Amino acid sequence: MKLLGGYSPQLLFYILNDLMFKKLPNFAVTNQFGLFLLVILFVLFFSFFTDGFSSRFNLFALSRVVAIDIMIGLAMMVVILTGGLNLSLGALGVSAAMFGGWLMEVVGIPIIPAMLLTLAMGGFLGWINGYVTVKTGVHSFIVTLATMSIYFGMMTLFTEAEAFRKLPETFTDFGSLKLFNKYVSPLLLVSIFFVFLLFYLFKFTDLGRKLIAAGANPDAAELSGISVGQMFIYCHILSGLLAAVAALMLTSRIGAAIPSMAGNLGFDWLLPAFLAPVLGGTLLSGGKVTVFGTMLGAVLVTLITNGLYLIEVGEFWIRFFLGIILLLAVLLDKAREFFAQKSNVLS
Amino acid sequence: MNFFSQEYFKKDWFGLLIVVLLSGVIISFFKPAFLSSFNLYVLMLSVSLWLVVAMSQMIIIAIGQMNLSVGAIGGLVAISFTGLMEVHGFSIPYAILTGLFIGLFCGFINGFLTVKTGISAFIITLATLYIFKGMNLGITEAQPFYQIPESIKNFGNAKIIGPVPYLIIIPIIITVMMWLLMNKTQSGRNMLAYGNSVQSSELMGISPTKVVITAHVISGFLAAIGGMLVVCRLQLGTPNIGDSWLLPSFAAPVIGGAVLAGGKVDVIATALGVIIVAIISQALVIFKIDPFFVQILLGFMILIAVFINRYREYKEERRKKIFIYEASHE
């Protein structure tokens, strides 16, 4: 019996039973697996039917874009966890990045401290979102709608809508660096690092479990001694931090901190921000996060956008298709939920 | 009976009316140019557009949802309206009818998808926002339409009397109709009941499908009118019409005391909210303050309005509790 590590024979029986009679291992029926297949399908499709999809240049460009989309998706995901959302994501990120650009160019602080201060700024702006949401009890939609306008307005006011173009070269070089036989941008590695960090946070730390518990059932969490308000504020701070990271990466990629890099009011980030977590299987009602799903969702979105450009649908129709994809994604999500419930009832 | 305990002091719109009057008096005291005929004309023009946009959002807030695609519908209608006239040679009435129909149809899609799938209106309208906006850009390739018939240009410029523009007639009619709808009709009350509590409204026999689709169709219709009003005012149909509608569309109803969870909206207060936003934006121009301040201020005004609404709810709850406590200790 010692070989079995103290498992009772009965438990062993259950495990064997599980392995034998469940035809597919758990991973295969998860959302991530379906997404993974879709990603592979699209990669194959685009590399056969378009010129230049698998070219070194395109893959490098893709890795730079996908890196940022992953961060944006994660930044939204941690707020969706609370059952809320963060409309100010783009405005917040751009404000933080402009602050960073100002620190590097005008104040002349070395890169590392400047980046840390930028992250602190992102966290602070996120804290404002969280604090106001929790203290007023108003839905985060309206709070972040207001702060979106405030952050973006303040940023434009302070910078006078001027870009910071003379950033330190080490910082901008990082964005154009090519790794692995010039196929991959280091930005993607940064994103993957954050993916694993968040995975660790939500899977293996006390804090992460508390955050999920607070999002899943605030009342139950409160009763079991978790300060739900505080957890929600943490989620917003985390969202601000991740948005600041995304904006810093974008700044490094463009080579300048530009006020309009996320569109007016930072609205251009909103679609990838929602697409990635929703495709990845994060529940909009809160309480469930899928870090790897969000990553795969972001990859899928970037792939499709890139592919649409390559098959020349015209850049103006891309938004249209992304809107349709978001719609299909939520409809599929709903269908999956429905069938999951049905199979639960049956078993 | 104390003078201050009169019924209208407790209404949402009363406090706002005082704010409107006070701010008007204060601004015109410092800058008499505020009351100049030209300034009032500009003020009324901006009020007339935002009134329609705010009503379009308000009716969705009434059922406890939100419509991000208001601006996208307005933009799509604006370019279809002008494009049909310029490229396809539609006559004005047909172009207007087609524009309104597009608005109705877009609203119907929003409502249908929301109620049939049970997915939150936020995410549905976010998707349709990009779909409508994508269609807009795909059709126009980001180029504006310039050929607007003279009669439409004249309508956009003409004044009825003194500084009052013709353009304000339609928004005023819409506001009155909305007031009647929300306060005097069965379907308006049904919407508020649905917004207040989906479950109890269903138990009362109100059909959610009917309520949600009606509200979204009206919202799309109003957004369409808004888009066409902008065309009249700008005298051209640009694809970026509607891009900046999101914030103002929420600002006015929220300042007007609408509860975002649904079930409580006040048409008059929303209209006053529009006027307050317009006056303040105008004042910033008159005092030569950076226009970016308008955005910041609008954000702060939403937050402050939310705080005030919250505080009033809190007081109301307390008052009820004390009342119940006293009643049980009689």
Image: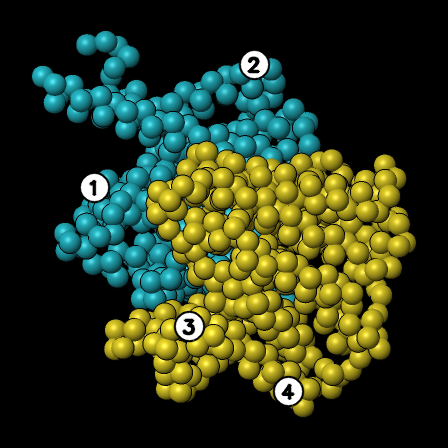
**Chain letter of the residue carrying label 4:** A
Instruction: Say which label, 4 or 3, has the lower sequence index.
Output: 3
Task: Please name the color used to draw chain A.
Answer: yellow
Q: Are marks 2 and 4 in contact (CB under 8 Å)?
A: no
**Residue B16 seen in the current view:** yes
Of badges 3 and 2, nearer the viewer stands: 3
Q: Amino acid at mark 3?
A: Tyr
| Marks 3/2 same chain | no
Instruction: Say which label, 1 or 2, has the lower sequence index.
Output: 2
**Residue A326 seen in the current view:** no
Q: Amino acid at mark 2?
A: Phe
Q: What residue is pinned by disc 2?
A: B29
How many angstroms separate mark 2 from mark 4 (CA)?
70 Å
The residue positioned 33% from the left and 30% from the top of the image is: B313
Of badges 1 and 2, nearer the viewer stands: 1
Residue B198 % position (x, y): 25, 52
How many angstroms separate mark 3 from mark 2 (CA)?
85 Å
| Marks 1/2 same chain | yes
Q: What residue is pinned by disc 3?
A: A7
Label 3: element kind: loop
Q: Is residue A347 above or below residue A149?
A: below
Q: Name the disc covering residue B184, or none.
A: 1
How many angstroms separate mark 4 from mark 3 (CA)?
45 Å
**Chain letter of the residue carrying label 2:** B
| Marks 3/1 same chain | no
